[in-house]
Image (cartoon, rainbow, N blue to C red):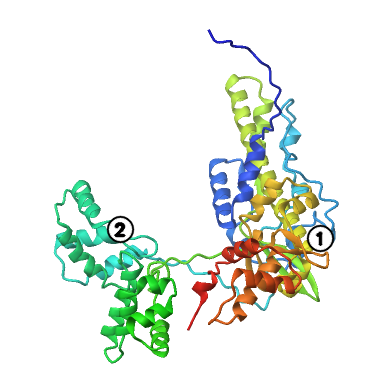
Amino acid sequence: MSDQRLTQVQRQELKLSPQQIQLMKLLQLPLIELEQRIKEEIESNPALEDTVNSDDNEHTSDSENPEENVGDSYDDNDDNGENDDYNDDEISINKEDEFDFNDYLPEEDEYDYAYKSQTNNHSTDDEDYQAPIVHEESFQDYLIHQLGYHDLTEEEEIIGEFIIGNLDDNGYLCRPIANIVDDLLFTMNMEVTEEDVRKVLKIVQQLDPPGIGATDLQECLLIQLQRLQEENPYNDYKLCMTVIKDCFEEFIKKHYDKIAKKTGASNRQLKAALDEILKLNPKPGDSSTSGAKNSHYITPDFFIYIKDGNLELSLDGRNNPDLKVNKQYVKMLEDFSKSKESRSMQEAATFVRQKIDSAKWFIDAIRQRQHTLYVTMKAIMDKQQEYFLTGDETKLKPMILKDIAEKVGLDISTISRVANSKYVQTPYGTFLLKFFFSEGITNEEGEEVSTREIKKILQDCVADESKAKPLTDEELMNVLKEKGYPIARRTVAKYREQLGIPVARLRKEL
């Protein structure tokens, strides 16, 4: 027998309450999803109500002072966040050890501090524009609609729709023809040959945008060149096609000298052909201009303005209704609590009390969410004040999640949830909050600078380099060192890759 021994292990675990979990989930929601979440909560809990009707949701308040949008409870002048003593463990809930009817009375005055939901982030001179709600067909629907214009048999239509359904996000058919034949047999009981599928695939490849339905990049470019030749018979795309058809490996590796030798083209002819090829679309399904591709709109959670040389922060509360505990439920609880006659009445009182508790917890979570968002964004704005005033990325200071967490007294995981899911609209564009976070290094003058500043300088160096002789990582390292940023070559390579900049050989142009 094996020697089995019982051992005692002391372990410390942090368990979150249901209310804390609820707050964490609410923190991650963007505004549109939060609106839906609130609607669902109101529908499931009759003790919770939205006291503002739809007509009151117009942008009627605080247009002159955006800071008032965040409510009077939070002092915008507290730049150091010293009074922000909120932390993740502080969630207001009612004590359940003893029932006190006063706990369930509407606290009208107490709740007036909440962020005003019907805020206005525009001046009275601005047009009240709302994005229209439109019906959008999917990209697949768009292609199937085009397919209908071709004279196809019923079987060919099914094959065509099946091929379109197997295109990837870039518009390529990556699934082998043999597999499609098998799929049609097993899923639709349709027996076809590979030749049948290839025939219909050729028709799909005639659809717009050009290049759709290709099996790889080479075929995608050739399809587009052939379409150009058909539409522009007076232009000669022969060299372009030769480069893609016969010199594709050399083309993607930018071995232009080998292409010139192989085709016998002069540098001038080759450059003209390459210029035409670079106009082609390598991802016809991803960047289609057909109008059928869905559009995605970002709703900012914060707005930063510059007024008289100072920064002003506003938190968008338009999707956060003025939530209250239903007074009728409070009155119902009062009536039930006075009745001691029956067990059913006491059970009813317990049910109503639970619903009211749930409503109060949800209201508290919504308010604490608003507070958490505001203090986090305020701390980021204060830390990156120079950037928000100028828009110069080189002014961004090194900043990590821990810096903001310590300033506002919140957990790092909470700051991460906010930074990874919330957007701020600035005079220079709309950004995800995590855009403003970056590590730092020390320059030759002993100052700590953001890695984002180094990346911006790296981008500028590549933009200004000679395209005939691009800078290698070693040369870029030396340039950065001359500018006062002593970083290793492998770090240069890492930043270059993060910026999506190819190696020097692939940046070369004739």
Residue 46 place in picture, x, y as percent: 57, 41
Q: Is residue 364 above or below residue 75?
A: above
Is residue 38 rendered to the left or right of residue 250?
right
Is residue 221 rendered to the left or right of residue 390?
left
Tally of marks? 2
Please identify the quarter of the rendering in which residue 425 is found. Answer: bottom right
Q: Which mark is residue 165?
A: 2
Q: Residue at x 29, y 79 (%)?
A: 227
Residue 292 place in picture, x, y as percent: 38, 69
Residue 275 place in picture, x, y as percent: 42, 83
Residue 158 place in picture, x, y as percent: 20, 59
Please identify the quarter of the rendering in which residue 70 is found. Answer: bottom right
Q: Secondary structure at mark 1?
A: loop
Is residue 31 rendered to the left or right of residue 105?
left
Q: Is residue 460 above or below residue 61?
A: below
Q: Residue at x 57, y 45 (%)?
A: 42
Amino acid type assigned to the residue bearing label 2 in the image: Gly
The residue at which mark 1 appears reads as 76
